[in-house]
Amino acid sequence: MAMIALKCPEIQVVVVDINEARIAAWNSDKLPIYEPGLDEVVKAARGRNLFFSTDVTKHVGEADIVFVSVNTPTKTQGVGAGKAADLTYWEGAARVIASCSTSSKIIVEKSTVPVKTADAIEKVLRRNCKHPGVQFEILSNPEFLAEGTAIEDLTAPDRVLIGGKDTPSGRAAVDALASVYAHWVPRERILCTNLWSAELSKLTANAMLAQRISSVNSISALCEATGADVQQVAKSIGTDSRIGPKFLNASVGFGGSCFQKDILNLVYICESVGLQAVADYWHQVILMNDYQKQRFVEQVISAMFNTISKKKIAVYGFAFKKDTGDTRETPAIDVCRGLMADGARVCVYDPQVEDSQIYQDLGTAKFEWDHPTPKSAPVSKDAISISHDPMEAAKDAHAICVLTEWDEFKAYDYQKVYDSMVKPAFIFDGRNILDHAKLREIGFIVYAVGKPLDPFLQKVY
Ligand code: UDX
């Protein structure tokens, strides 16, 4: 919304939320999320044509276009628990819109939703609006930005996707939204489809992206077993223009708020319409991701003589990727839990993630984090500690696990790090970002995902 406000000075944008603290933060100097470049965009438009308010009724009532970006978490109970999207907040938003609308509106689905959600929402809107003559036209306009590069992605998107009904009023609504984006996005990059294609494209895009990572991660296991190098394999296949070079970095596993949730949702939809073979196909992407995280933990344990009990292990990076403080579904949660389950003393260092977030993540059940008041159990402070200094985190540690690809990890003085650690000193590079030859020269025993195994590690197996 900040980008729309920046690019379209004549359009008044008001972001509303019932959470007062969150709106206050958006109105303050310290925005509630860390995203490179976002501060500048918000500050350029805020107070001019970008406003943040808790007065939902007033601003929704006055709007011509309403973007709905509420959470659609994975259901934790009831039918479809663990897979289906929970549309409680969407339905709630639709009821609010219906009750305060005195004029016709275009309602834009911005949250990722299951296919056919627009149908359900339309019914709620129609049946709850008391004002005669008010019409709602529903559009699907999924967001493809990635965290950490959100501003770049919004400034020059590969495409903007708008789905609407193939009726005169549907086409007029699509045109109205397209003309907003046309302020800065070339027309040929604004794709218009039917509603269901747009809704399904979002789930499919995320499923295909995640599938690439699971595919390359599955090959990383084979590389380690055979002496091949996954980075060489990725480069070799990525030069085929049909495959392309992006999103082929083997890792400890993918995280983030979208991939797992959207695939589970896709799986659930396939099962609901009786397509079990299709559901199983996509579910395998998640199972391979879980396998990769588990495999990483097992590598750590077996390399360290099958016991990590009471050993200090430094974890470099807790965010699900670099340049964000976001930890949703980060592989670090499963890896830290796996290490703690085997008795390790884990010390986490991350340049952005708040301490309280780490404690909450490690004490919260799967999928609970996406609900407004996650139930979390306290984690033992013996098992987990947090350091704000990477050198201190590594001091007296037996091993370092690199779980996020923060650039600063590449620039450390690893001789100094090595000198402060217990020997033999191990580094497990879950992101393949460090200079492994140099680390070996210093004396480290190095494991890197999908790379030929260190002779020391080979002897162990
Ligand atoms: C993703 C989609 O990219 C975006 O289009 C959609 O709108 C939201 O979901 P995001 O979750 O922000 O964006 O991050 P992304 O860059 O896609 O990375 C997801 C995860 O995959 C991260 O944990 C990342 O580290 C991992 N990843 C990515 C790999 O392990 N290897 C890769 O080659 C690429």
Image (spheres, rainbow, N blue to C red):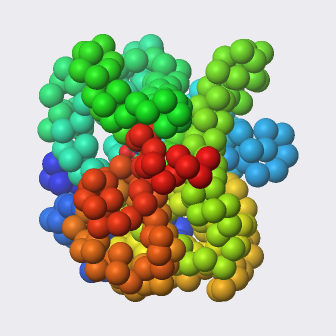
| Residue at 70% across, 23% down | 280
| Percent position of residue 307, x then y | 68, 66
| Percent position of residue 383, x then y | 66, 79
Vertical comparison of 417 with 256: above or below: below
| Residue at 71% across, 30% down | 268
| Percent position of residue 397, x then y | 49, 78
| Residue at 17% across, 65% down | 40
The image quarter in which residue 28 lies: bottom left
Q: Nearer the viewer, residue 450 or 337?
A: 450
Q: Nearer the viewer, residue 370 or 328?
A: 328
Q: Residue furthest right?
A: 78
State whether residue 225 appears in this view.
Answer: yes
Q: Nearer the viewer, residue 284 or 64?
A: 284
Vertical comparison of 93 with 187: above or below: below
Q: Is residue 400 left or right of residue 113?
A: left
| Percent position of residue 132, x then y | 57, 38
State whether residue 92 appears in this view.
Answer: no
The image quarter in which residue 110 lies: top left
| Residue at 38% across, 83% down | 420
